[in-house]
Image (spheres, rainbow, N blue to C red):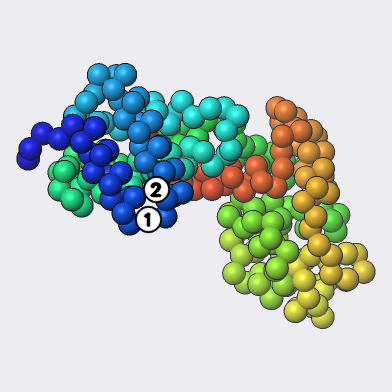
Amino acid sequence: MKIIFLSQALARFTAYQNAENQPKYARAVTARVAELIDHCAEAGITKLADVELKHIRDWLRKTPKKSHPGAWKARHLAAQIFFNYCVFVELLAPDNNPLAASPRGATLTNKPLLTEFDLHRVLLVIPDTHMGIQDKIACLLLWNGYKLSDLNALAISDIVRFPAAAKELAESTLQQCQHLRNASMWIDSQGSPRILHGQKLNKRLQRYAERAELSNPARVSASLIFQSGNYHRLSEMEEE
């Protein structure tokens, strides 16, 4: 296969993006790829086929600490799109695609997330009160990929589709509300539906995190639990 320089691949990729996609998207994705190519150039890598996973890993780790939590993911996705495009148009042999398999572990994010052990520590200190049990269920669902908006749309009848740990805990409480099968998943002690308000839930989570003696408990939130769970599922907790 002919030697292709990164600058040549970027020029072709840019032309394709400008022709086939909306200008705003094309500018964003090509700008991220250009950043990656600049990073490779600093490491002395100028040829497309010479880019290795370690170069992409190092570039992702340079994501600014104060960036939006999804910044690393947007960069990673842009790199995947670029290398997949290069394979598709035969600028790069499939075996030389550094992102043929998604990087895992520390490559994926530089944001301090919760570990599974942290989650269990939080769950252990949540009291077994009516609200406490519902907060435990909410934490387990957030960890398993449910957004706060998803939680507020749940009914008791949805319990059968919950992940195992959340399902077991939720089913153990059903004996007290057999007559509320179609009610909201989130009810007060009188059986009336209630909403999980983000700010109130976050304040409770921060209190639980403080009791569990997590470092910097003020950062714990529904969003952090959701992001941490997604990260651990994506990385599969494997080392590079």
> Is residue 236 in sight in this rendering?
no
Chain-order first, disc 2 or disc 1: 1
Do we see residue 152 in this rendering?
Answer: yes
Task: Measuring from the top left, give residue 190's x and y in whole percent.
Answer: 92, 69
Separation of residues labelled 2 and 1 (CA atoms): 6 Å
Describe residue 232's horizontal placement relative to residue 224 as left or right: left
Q: Residue furthest left?
A: 1
How crowded pointer 1 is (Cα within 10 Å; few <14, some 14-19, many 20+) is rated as: few
**What residue sits 66% from the left and 69% below the top?**
159
Say what secondary structure mark 2 lies in.
helix
Q: Are marks 2 and 1 in contact (CB under 8 Å)?
A: yes
Residue under numbered circle 2: 26
**Mark seen at residue 169:** none
- The three-letter amino acid code for the residue at tag 2 is Ala
Give the quarter of the figure containing the C terminus.
Answer: top left
Task: Give the amino acid at mark 1.
Answer: Asn
Q: Residue at x 78, y 75 (%)?
A: 183
In the displayed structure image, the side of residue 64 where residue 195 appears, left or right = right
**Considering depth in this image, is 33 or 237 the residue closer to the camera?**
33
Please name the residue that numbered disc 1 is placed on: 21
Position above or below: 191 against 225: below
Q: Horizontal and vertical percent for residue 65? A: 57, 27
